[in-house]
Amino acid sequence: MNDFLLTPELTALRREVRTFVDEHVIPNEDAVLAEDAKGERTTLDRLQAIAKEGGLWTPHLPVDVGGRGLGPMGMCAVFRELGRSPAGARACNCDAPDQGNMDLLLRVASESIRERWLGPLIADESTSAFCMTEPAPGAGSDPSNLATTAVRDGDDWVINGHKWYSTGGGKAAFLIVMARTSEDKRNGASMFVVDRHAAGIEHVRDMNTMSEGFLAHREAEFLFKDVRVGGDAILGQIGDGFSLAQARLVPARLTHCMRWLGLADRTLDMCREYIGRRVSFGKPLARHGAIQRMIADNAMKIHQGNLMTLHCATLLEAGLDKQARPYSSMAKNQVAKLLCQVLDDAIQMHGGLGYSDDLPFGRWYRSSRAARIADGPDEVHEMVVARDWLAGRLNLLV
Ligand SMILES: Cc1cc2nc3c(=O)[nH]c(=O)nc-3n(C[C@H](O)[C@H](O)[C@H](O)COP(=O)(O)OP(=O)(O)OC[C@H]3O[C@@H](n4cnc5c(N)ncnc54)[C@H](O)[C@@H]3O)c2cc1C
């Protein structure tokens, strides 16, 4: 039988990816992360070679640049499986933020920019970062607070500003920088592709956050002082910044949901063994009503988030990006919250063992907590949903 809403081909691909994750990635994920902490990548290289051989490399990209040409439904099939391990997406070179950045470059970068930056990114010989967020009072939940500027100087643009939370920025080869190019409310921002080592860029620090950094998931802070880029560095047209951000963020947000669903599902699966064998007050934990309620609640939440994600993916697949927007907000809000809840409950059900580093739940919780903030905090997505519902344009019984 085919998986829900997936074609026979995508059902088969999904199984292939699950096998790859179960047989290769999960048994090696600790080694990948331990080596990464020392700046090494022997095991990651080995996993990437297996992924390439199995045709699982950059699966989101069009076939002519080495991908599988997957649409949003295909990404659902693949990314939920890869998300079951923190190393899964990177093993196939489709982790955030590179995956969304590759898509953006392919769609709207000038030929010279694509030639310079895209090939190495697709080969995972380099990485990239997306620099939109600024410390207060600059752009955060509200992108219209954007304070970084780009001013035209002859054929060039000169960028000045302060960015932080640029995931993967410290080691990136290039940055996609959102900057103000006019005071126009709708069309006042543009995106530039900037060499990370260009004169005038100060990498202030990799920020210490609640989560220990791993792979590309390290957040950088940058100062831009008179950073000069050529006219070909602009993505799309001048003034396209906000609309491109939407175009990048809606599908990228959904791919986050897919990966997060995979991790939530694996986490809940991992609870089965302990609650089945651990006896408390005369019976296994799994036979206590309070534990069953936690399991049922989390199972239902994962199912809800999965349906929301699949529904939104069908809209994107049909090219209905604008209609998909409130549903992507719903999915992002729901899946981010359920991921945190599932991890918190997994810690609870495992007691002291769950809180210890003998199991990965604490580490996963610390990194997953960002899901409720990054790419728009919960409240902003709730605002979008409420706004569309109040305007009478949100169909709930799809
Ligand atoms: C791990 C991590 C990785 C990130 N990676 C990137 C990246 O690669 N590139 C990038 O550009 N940014 C990145 N971000 C930044 C992220 O997108 C911002 O943190 C987010 O948009 C919120 O902006 P802010 O932090 O300025 O919060 P603020 O705008 O200061 O908001 C603070 C809080 O106010 C509340 N709030 C805000 N607006 C409303 C509202 N309308 N109604 C009610 N409450 C509201 C919310 O609770 C919110 O959390 C990352 C963040 C994290 C945590």
Image: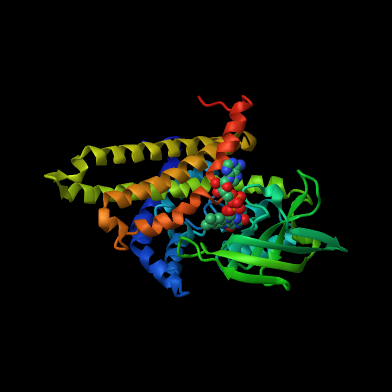
Q: Measured along the vertical axis of the image, is residue 376 above or below residue 43?
A: above
Return the residue found at the far left: 282
| Residue 101 located left or right of residue 396 | right
Q: Residue at x 45, y 53 (%)?
A: 368
The type of colouring in the image is rainbow
Residue 4 in percent (x, y) is at 42, 35
| Residue 311 located left or right of residue 115 | left
Question: Is the N terminus in the top left, top right, bottom left or bottom right quadrant?
Answer: top left
Q: Residue at x 26, y 58 (%)?
A: 353
Number of numbered discs visible in the structure rendering:
0
Q: In the image shown, does 164 or 245 lie closer to the viewer?
A: 164
Q: In the image shown, does 130 or 349 lie closer to the viewer?
A: 349
Return the residue found at the far front: 137
Can residue 57 be seen by looking at this rendering?
Answer: yes
Can residue 171 be seen by looking at this rendering?
Answer: no
Q: Residue at x 79, y 54 (%)?
A: 181
Q: In the image shown, does 15 or 232 lie closer to the viewer?
A: 232
Q: Measured along the vertical axis of the image, is residue 153 above or below residue 189?
A: below
Using the rendered view, name the quadrant where residue 168 is placed: bottom right
| Residue 313 located left or right of residue 282 | right
Residue 135 in percent (x, y) is at 64, 58
Residue 303 in percent (x, y) is at 39, 37
Residue 285 in percent (x, y) is at 20, 45
Using the rendered view, name the quadrant where residue 53 is placed: bottom left
